[in-house]
């Protein structure tokens, strides 16, 4: 294959990848607008040069991504990451309450051992958030996982900055 053909193929692959990501972002935008997550507030989707929360969330859960080899496992990892991220942003009292609620729910559906693993993972991720991502105060509101060509793509809706409800 000539250099020109290689360049053309690379560009076509890049455009296809962007298309898959755009479809996921559009689906997430429809979901956020239809569910009125912000209680009637105007929702703005920024796709400019600011830090992409999807990239931040992927970096946040990166140490555990090698274990998430299926879409189901990846979605569970992202869900746990979102719980940990948002828990790290609230007061210790609220955090304790939030983690107790989610842990009880997991214990009821999956058993005590899974609930303990969940709680340990969330606590590790909270420490990671406080150590490496402390300056990012954006709240993750919702997310969308899509899959294309054997890769998972993530779109995230978050508050634009520190946000209080």
Image (cartoon, rainbow, N blue to C red):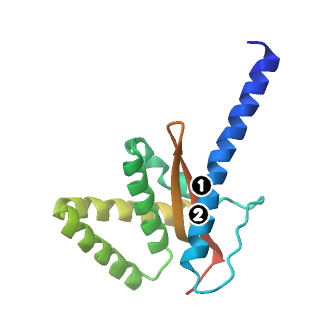
The local secondary structure at tag 1 comes to helix
Q: Nearer the viewer, residue 154 or 20?
A: 20
The percent coordinates of residue 129 (x first, y second) are 50, 64
The percent coordinates of residue 48 (x first, y second) are 77, 60
Give the number of callouts: 2
Q: Is residue 34 left or right of residue 98?
A: right
Residue on which disc 1 sits: 24
Farthest residue toward the left?
112
Q: CA distance from mark 1 to mark 2?
A: 6 Å
Mark 2: few, some, or many residues within 10 Å (few <14, many ≥20)?
many
Q: Residue at x 62, y 46 (%)?
A: 20
Residue 123 disc label:
none
Q: Residue at x 73, y 26 (%)?
A: 9
Mark 1: few, some, or many residues within 10 Å (few <14, many ≥20)?
many
Q: Is residue 64 left or right of residue 119?
A: right
Residue on which disc 2 sits: 28
Q: Nearer the viewer, residue 125 or 74?
A: 74
In which quadrant of the rendered view does residue 160 lie? bottom right
The local secondary structure at tag 2 comes to helix
User: Do we see residue 138 in this rendering?
Assistant: no
The percent coordinates of residue 45 (x first, y second) are 70, 68
Above-or-below relation of 89 to 8: below
Q: Nearer the viewer, residue 65 or 155?
A: 155
Assess whether mark 2 and mark 1 are in contact (beta carbons under 8 angstroms).
yes
Q: Is residue 72 left or right of residue 35?
A: left
Above-or-below relation of 126 to 150: below
In which quadrant of the rendered view does residue 46 lie? bottom right
The quarter in which the C terminus is drawn is bottom right
Q: Residue at x 51, y 54 (%)?
A: 145
């Amino acid at each position: 294959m000539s250099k020109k053909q290689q360049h053309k193929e690379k560009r076509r692959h890049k455009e296809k990848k962007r298309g898959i990501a755009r479809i996921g972002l559009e689906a997430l935008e429809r979901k956020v607008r239809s569910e009125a997550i912000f209680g009637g507030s105007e929702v703005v989707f920024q796709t400019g040069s600011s830090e992409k929360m999807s990239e931040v969330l992927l970096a946040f859960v990166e140490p555990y991504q090698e274990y998430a080899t299926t879409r189901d496992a990846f979605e569970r990892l992202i869900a746990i990451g979102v719980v940990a991220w948002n828990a790290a942003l609230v007061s210790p009292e609220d955090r304790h309450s939030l983690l107790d609620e989610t842990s009880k729910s997991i214990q009821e559906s999956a058993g005590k051992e899974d609930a303990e693993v969940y709680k340990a993972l969330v606590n590790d991720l909270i420490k990671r958030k406080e150590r490496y991502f402390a300056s990012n105060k954006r709240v993750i509101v919702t997310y969308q996982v899509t899959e294309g060509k054997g890769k998972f793509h993530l779109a995230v809706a978050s508050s634009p900055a520190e946000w209080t409800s």
